[in-house]
Amino acid sequence: MLRTEPIRSAVADVVSTRRHEMDVKSQVSAEEWETRVNLAAAYRLVAQFGWSDLIFTHISARVPGGDHHFLINPYGLMFDEVTASSLVKIDLEGRKVMESPYDINPAGFTIHSAIHAAREDAQCVLHVHSVNGIAVSAQRDGVLPLSQQSIFVLSSLGYHDYEGVALNEDEKPRLVADLGDKNFLMLRNHGLLTVAETIPDAFLFMYLFETTCMIQVRAQAGGGALTPVPQTIIDGAQAQAAAVTRGAGGHLAWPGLLRRLDRSDPSFRD
């Protein structure tokens, strides 16, 4: 005889979750909803660009309003399943401050909470375990000045030595010190991290970071002698970027990226 209880329970869970997601927009400010949509878009884009590591990395964003609340992904959802409503609102300790049927990965917020607490300008912290990024993070010399993309990364890059899975609170001060006031952080043997005042800028920084690593790995694989970019050019990179993009540049690329998502699957806005 077919047992229907588990089926009924699963259906009830789906209905309850969907009801919660439909209610979220009515419970938050217009500013928070906009942040939710942009953060959900960032998760979808990370999945599209192939930087996700199943469910095991994170992008966090500060909720507008000054309450030290943050949004992060529900633990267990793939990045291409994240929506504006499903994002979980938490405090600096990783505790939920708004009702949600989803849990978060407490260990995953260790790195993010340290940076959000130390940097008021860290509106968004984006961390990935991309294959190219980890490959370069394992190299003793780290990022090399081999491409135009690399000069923007090298002009604001820090390194943090691997201390195992990010579970220990006492790692936070060392992580924050290694990042300093920079926008790019290479986590040795681990992955890439970007920090920015906006979600679009954090995403653009990660695009540059990952592209830099991909170009480096391919250039090294070619086996020929490599031509480095002179340090004088790296020293002027940030001024050049500001001149070309009128800022960090995320605001220029972001509308097109959102249109790209809308064409493929606009459900991130739900």
Image: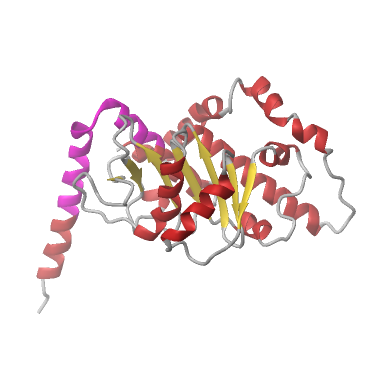
Q: Which quadrant is home to the N terminus?
A: bottom left
Figure quadrant of residue 87: top left
Above-or-below relation of 167 to 230 = below
Q: Residue placed farthest to the right in the image?
A: 225
Q: Nearer the viewer, residue 24 or 66?
A: 66
Q: Is residue 143 left or right of residue 40?
A: right
Figure quadrant of residue 71: top left
Q: Magenta stretch?
A: 14-38
Specify whether residue 91 is in view. yes
Residue 73 included in the magenta stretch of the image = no
Q: Nearer the viewer, residue 186 or 76?
A: 186
Above-or-below relation of 100 to 32 = below
Q: Is residue 140 left or right of residue 259?
A: right
Predominant secondary structure, magenta span:
helix
Residue at coordinates 21% horizontally, 44% vertically from top-left? 98
Q: Which quadrant is home to the C terminus?
A: top left
- Total of numbered circles in the picture? 0
Above-or-below relation of 167 to 102 = below
Q: Give residue 85's position: percent from left, percent from top.
A: 27, 41
Q: Residue placed farthest to the bottom in the image?
A: 1
